[in-house]
Amino acid sequence: MDQRLPHNPTAYDDDWEDQPRQGPFYKWFLGIAVPLTVAGFGIHAIITQQADYSGRVTLILHGVSAIAFGIAAISLAIFLHCHYFWGNIYDQIWFAVLGKILAACGFIGALGVLIVRVGVLGKM
């Protein structure tokens, strides 16, 4: 019989479920600066209905696809803010956990729309 040791995360493990790593870098940079930047890209994509993603492959989105990309970006920003900022102030406060759950739902839904529209239907 294979027995595994139970997962016992420490304060230095960040598993997106428990309390994040502590410190001003995590609270202010990953909890405020990064989410504001990501949310800015999402808001710009929703307002202009155009999103440009340049990675290994350049992807230019228009209309509903750009709006879905923007919603996914804003949801990611909310998730990061709830995890790193509120998780650093309070340990597992209810609205930080609820914010992460709702943000994950929004991210998964928007990403699903984006995958169907771009990957299956080919509508950019």
Image (cartoon, helix red, strand yellow):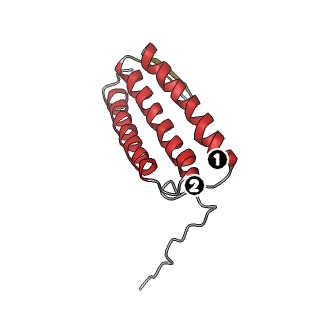
Does 32 appear above or below 16?
A: above
> Is 17 left or right of 23, judged from the image as shown?
left
Residue at point 60%, 66% (across, down): 10
Label 1: which secondary element: helix
Query: Are the residues at dot 2 and dot 1 in contact (C-beta closer than 8 Å)?
Result: yes
Label 2: which secondary element: loop
Local crowd size for mark 1, using a 10 Å CA cut-off: few (<14), some (14–19), many (≥20)? some
Does 2 appear above or below 28?
A: below
Residue type (three-letter) at the residue carrying disc 1: Tyr
Quarter-wise, where is residue 121 in the image? top left
Which residue is the site of mark 2? 20
Residue at point 54%, 31% (across, down): 38
> Is 52 left or right of 28, judged from the image as shown?
left
x and y percentages locating residue 71 in the rendered image = 41, 29
Which residue is the site of mark 1? 26
Of callouts 2 and 1, the N-terminal one: 2
Q: In which quarter of the image is the C terminus?
A: top left
Front position in the image: 86 or 60: 86
**Could you give the CA–CA distance between mark 2 and mark 1, rounded to whole angstroms?**
8 Å
Residue at point 60%, 37% (across, down): 32
- Residue found at the very far right of the displayed protein: 24
> Is 94 left or right of 36, judged from the image as shown?
left
Residue at point 64%, 61% (across, down): 12
Camera sees residue 60: no
Residue type (three-letter) at the residue carrying disc 2: Pro
x and y percentages locating residue 1 in the rendered image = 41, 86
Quarter-wise, where is residue 27 in the image? top right
Camera sees residue 50: yes
